[in-house]
Image (tube, helix red, strand yellow):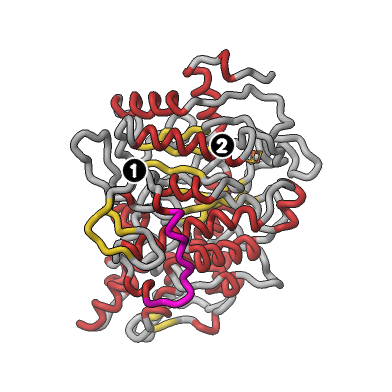
């Protein structure tokens, strides 16, 4: 049943377009710190928005909607693909502004996450998104958090203009290889997806340079400055007193930051045949080459009957998604590389134990490490020791020998660490350092948690505090800092 947008009430559209947005998980909000301003509505907190969850487990602190679920494309994994006979709707920019402002005033939301299907063309869709956000920021003086999708194929200037109005932007990679894209989303190509991502990255770098926030980058060679013309019609621009840098736009004040909360992306897990190694290698490249703030993984929920996709009754691979989040954490904070965690011979994670334990079990020759002498890098590789507890150990051992009791107080997870450490030359228990034995013990310990992850009562979206389970020493406060990029 196709329904024309003109016959729908605002409530009908909201029902359709909020529901259509729920499979996009790349929407945690953080990294922007903007105080309330006189005459403006809202602010954006550095600690991110504390999400609450609706009855179906979905995040509701951001109004998460599509501008339209109409789409000219036919990605086989997508509910909104053109072949699907579904109720369709498109908001006008004014309608979205009304919803945001009214919901904000009622304290239902603290920001907006705006994505869209491709209506008519990428340019047309991006123009509508830009108009919406422009209206919201100028006529409605909305000063709260906004995360917008960049539509691949849209003109560069539209993406750049939007970037000056929002806090975060994202371009969804969706599928991590050319072959999968060809099979499941034939109108998309890696080049087409990477182009706006590169553009946003350059915009962020250029803006940081212009306001003198990153002098090291200024000295670094090889940064491609964007042409001045792209920036000169920044609609939100308030020129500050900063100097004009050659080839760049004039320094601006913080109200006109370009994508201050950085960019993110999302990859679907399980719709195509890539291994964890392939997924993690792409993730690593995205962090290294495009300066991404986060890569989100989304366990594929079968929605369409299609011979090229998993059967409609296949359960979403939630445990696999969880392992990938843990591995992502190891890449970003523990100094691991994708090639260390997985190999061509062993391209997928053992879903029964976390990736750090898995790595340690395959490198038992490096254990046990002596807590009194191990370097910070060595400590970080011990299962059960996290960033904070490793720092505490380094500090505390300057003042004397440490015992297992001390480690426990430092929130080292001894249940895992006991197999890999000695204190004063002794292990906690007399146990064999043997792969099979330790694997059995760790698998047993993890089985309850694994069951919970793979059998959720409801299909729940990643929350602000998920994926902080690697080593148990990260507090909620740390989590908030980390999401805010302050660690
Ligand atoms: S372009 Fe986006 S909305 Fe359209 S079918 Fe593909 S994934 Fe779905």
Answer whether residue 455 is visible to the viewer in this image.
yes
Residue 169 shows which numbered tag?
none
437 vs 62: above or below = below
Query: Where is ligand 1, by quadrant?
Result: top right
In the displayed structure, does residue 110 sit left or right of residue 351? left
Answer whether residue 319 is visible to the viewer in this image.
no
Q: Dot 1: few (<14), some (14–19), or many (≥20) neighbours within 10 Å?
A: many
User: x%, y% of residue 397?
Assistant: 26, 81
User: x%, y% of residue 181?
Assistant: 71, 52
SS class, disc 1: loop
In the displayed structure, does residue 353 sit left or right of residue 175? left
Question: Which residue is pictured at 46% across the width and 38% down the height?
Answer: 130
Question: Which residue is pictured at 50% across the width and 15% down the height?
Answer: 9
In this view, the residue in front, 218 or 468, is 218
Question: Which residue is pictured at 74% across the width and 31% down the height?
Answer: 83
Q: Is residue 221 magenta?
A: yes
Ligand 1 closer than 8 Å to label 2 CB: no
322 vs 418: above or below = above
Question: Which residue is pictured at 51% across the width and 57% down the height?
Answer: 199
First in sequence: mark 1 vs mark 2: 1
In this view, the residue in front, 47 or 330, is 47
SS class, disc 2: helix
Q: Which residue is mark 1?
A: 49
Image depth: mark 1 or mark 2 in front: 2
Residue 125 shows which numbered tag?
2
Looking at the rendering, the stretch of residues picked out in magenta corresponds to 219-230
Q: Dot 2: few (<14), some (14–19), or many (≥20) neighbours within 10 Å?
A: many
Q: Quadrant of residue 315?
A: top right
């Amino acid at each position: 049943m196709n329904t024309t947008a003109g016959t729908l009430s605002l409530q009908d559209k909201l029902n359709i377009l909020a529901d259509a947005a729920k499979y996009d998980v790349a929407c945690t909000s953080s990294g922007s710190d903007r105080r309330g301003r006189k005459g403006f509505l809202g602010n954006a907190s550095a600690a991110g928005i504390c999400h609450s969850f609706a009855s179906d487990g979905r995040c509701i602190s951001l109004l998460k909607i599509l501008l339209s679920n109409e789409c000219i494309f036919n990605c086989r994994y997508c509910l909104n693909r053109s072949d699907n006979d579904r109720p369709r709707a498109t908001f006008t920019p004014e309608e979205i502004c009304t919803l945001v402002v009214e919901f904000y005033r009622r304290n239902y939301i603290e920001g907006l996450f705006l994505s869209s299907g491709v209506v008519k063309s990428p340019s047309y869709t991006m123009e509508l998104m830009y108009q919406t956000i422009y209206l919201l920021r100028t006529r409605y003086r909305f000063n709260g958090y906004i995360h917008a999708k960049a539509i691949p194929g849209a003109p560069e200037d539209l993406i750049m203009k939007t970037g000056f109005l929002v806090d975060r932007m994202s371009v969804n990679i969706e599928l991590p290889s050319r072959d999968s894209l060809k099979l499941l989303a034939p109108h998309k190509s890696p080049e087409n997806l990477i182009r706006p991502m590169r553009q946003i990255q350059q915009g962020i770098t250029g803006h940081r340079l212009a306001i003198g926030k990153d002098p090291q980058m200024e000295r670094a060679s090889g940064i491609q400055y964007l042409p001045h013309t792209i920036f000169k019609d920044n609609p939100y621009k308030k020129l500050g007193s900063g100097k004009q840098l050659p080839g760049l736009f004039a320094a601006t004040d913080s109200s006109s930051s370009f994508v201050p909360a950085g960019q993110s992306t999302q990859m679907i897990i399980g719709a195509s045949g890539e291994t964890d190694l392939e997924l993690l290698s792409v993730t690593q490249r995205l962090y290294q080459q495009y300066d991404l703030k986060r890569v989100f993984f989304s366990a594929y929920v079968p929605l369409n009957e299609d011979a090229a996709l998993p059967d409609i009754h296949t359960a979403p691979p939630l445990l696999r998604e969880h392992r990938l989040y843990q591995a992502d954490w190891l890449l970003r904070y523990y100094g691991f590389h994708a090639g260390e965690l997985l190999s061509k011979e062993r391209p997928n994670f053992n879903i029964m134990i976390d990736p750090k334990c898995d790595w340690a079990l395959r490198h038992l020759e490096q254990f046990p490490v002596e807590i009194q002498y191990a370097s910070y890098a060595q400590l970080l590789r011990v299962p059960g020791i996290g960033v904070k507890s490793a720092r505490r150990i380094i500090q505390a051992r300057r003042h004397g020998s440490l015992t297992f009791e001390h480690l426990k107080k430092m929130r080292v997870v001894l249940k895992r660490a006991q197999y890999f450490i000695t204190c004063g030359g002794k292990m906690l228990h007399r146990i064999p350092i043997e792969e099979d034995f330790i694997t059995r013990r760790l698998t047993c310990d993890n089985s309850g948690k694994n069951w919970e992850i793979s059998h959720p009562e409801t299909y729940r979206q990643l929350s602000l505090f998920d994926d902080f389970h690697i080593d148990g020493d990260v507090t909620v406060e740390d989590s908030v800092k980390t999401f805010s990029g302050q660690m």
